[in-house]
Image (tube, coloured by chain):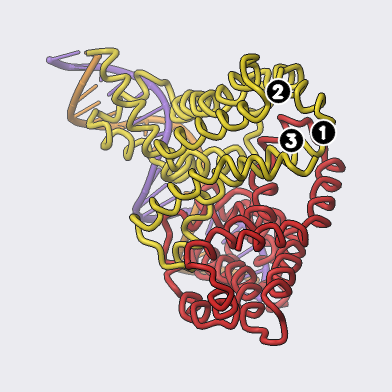
Chain colours: A red, B yellow, C orange, D purple
Amino acid sequence: MGIETEMKIKEAAKKVFRSKGFAATRTRDIAEEAQINLALLNYYFKSKQQLFNIIMMEDLEDIFQVIISNANDKSLSLREKLFSLAEKYADVIAEKPELPNFILSEVHGNHEFLLDHFGIKESLSKSDMMAQFFGLGFSQEEIANIVVNLLGYIIFPYISRPMYTVIFNMDEDAFSRFINNRRKQIPEWIDSLLQKK
Amino acid sequence: MGIETEMKIKEAAKKVFRSKGFAATRTRDIAEEAQINLALLNYYFKSKQQLFNIIMMEDLEDIFQVIISNANDKSLSLREKLFSLAEKYADVIAEKPELPNFILSEVHGNHEFLLDHFGIKESLSKSDMMAQFFGLGFSQEEIANIVVNLLGYIIFPYISRPMYTVIFNMDEDAFSRFINNRRKQIPEWIDSLLQKK
DNA sequence: GTCTATAATTCGATAGAC
DNA sequence: GTCTATCGAATTATAGAC
């Protein structure tokens, strides 16, 4: 059962790494979660670090691919691009809520991962989206603000969830409703971000 | 030099824990940073975990105390409260930029820390700020949105810094300017958040 | 209070049988 | 490919001299 075992390990590793981070995760935790023998982890993936790298790369790909594919879709206006981007992000994160915290925590320091393995810097700066932004008279800094405020609107509630679920006494259901209602307001949010110009 | 050594260890531990997190930090790192003998760490704080707990509690106190003290200052209008809150947060985080990431990463799972050690839930729900919100006709959910959007505006740029400094090619100076310019727009931001009503 | 030396444990990784 | 057994390194914590 070669390939099947490999997948079991990878899925288990995703789960454990995302919830505990690299340093706090023990290979024994992953083996138990995958219900496989500890030695098989090294047999398939050589080391804890390599297994982690594979998962981190895949997760980063998930995140950046959304940005890049949208930024270069010439059939969309700027507002449509941002709306599509926001929608897809909301979907990805709703499906894997630990993703933002995981990536942002683990990247802190291990910059090796972000140092343009994906060619983002280039492919974004030359993207259709950027041309549209500049065409409308936005400065580099205004663009950065719009992107940060838009992504923050979507991502920050997940990241800060433990803080304000205590403050506002939210259970799981209340949090779901909260997130869903925020989603409905994304178009208004985007318009108000663009309106400044 | 009892108390002095104790402080040196605590300061070193703050620095190392905040930058690497609990699991990735070795007591040897702390001892080296503090320039003390490794054994003294256990002499003063008994264990790595206890030292960590003390620091995390103090950091959480820093964060929540800002909220609570503002929420109960009856001399301020709601807008003034939010403005004061935002200002103080911006100051705290500008001074300790690793704080948000540290707390949000480490709290994930170790909910022991947040389970209302501070009585926040109560003292906030009965606060002057909440009364003012309700008096203006805001619902619980609208309040949560305002708070999340305001804190996100301030905190999210720090948390997501590694991502978009790559995307937007920001160096240290550019990041500082970016943050400072965002600070100037906090009043407008608060007004637009409140305006919805 | 501070140091050296070391005990005790945890954990990643591998050898080797099946 | 999978398992058991174990090694070896790293790391927390402590005993005991000064």
Mark 1 to mark 3 CA distance (whole Å): 18 Å
The amino acid type of the residue labelled 2 equals Met
Label 2 residue SS: helix
Residue A35 seen by the camera: no
Residue in the foreground of this view, choosing between A25 and A89: A89
Q: Which mark is residue B129?
A: 2
Label 3 residue SS: helix
Task: Give the number of the mark in front: 2 or 3.
Answer: 2
Residue A116, quarter of picture: bottom left
Against A107, residue B81 (above or below) is above
Q: Residue at x 69, y 49 (%)?
A: A158
On the image, the x and y values in percent for residue B160 come to: 53, 55
The chain letter for the residue carrying disc 3 is A
Against A150, residue B183 (above or below) is above
Against B174, residue B7 (above or below) is above
Q: Residue at x 74, y 42 (%)?
A: B195
The amino acid type of the residue labelled 1 equals Phe
Badge 1: how crowded within 10 Å, few (<14), some, or many (20+)?
some
Labels 1 and 2 touching (C-beta < 8 A):
no
Mark 1 to mark 2 CA distance (whole Å): 12 Å
Q: Are marks 1 and 2 on the same chain?
A: yes
Left or right: residue A134 compared with residue D3: left
Q: Residue furthest bottom?
A: A74
Residue A82 seen by the camera: yes
Q: Which residue is mark 3?
A: A165
The amino acid type of the residue labelled 3 equals Thr
Q: Which residue is mark 1?
A: B138
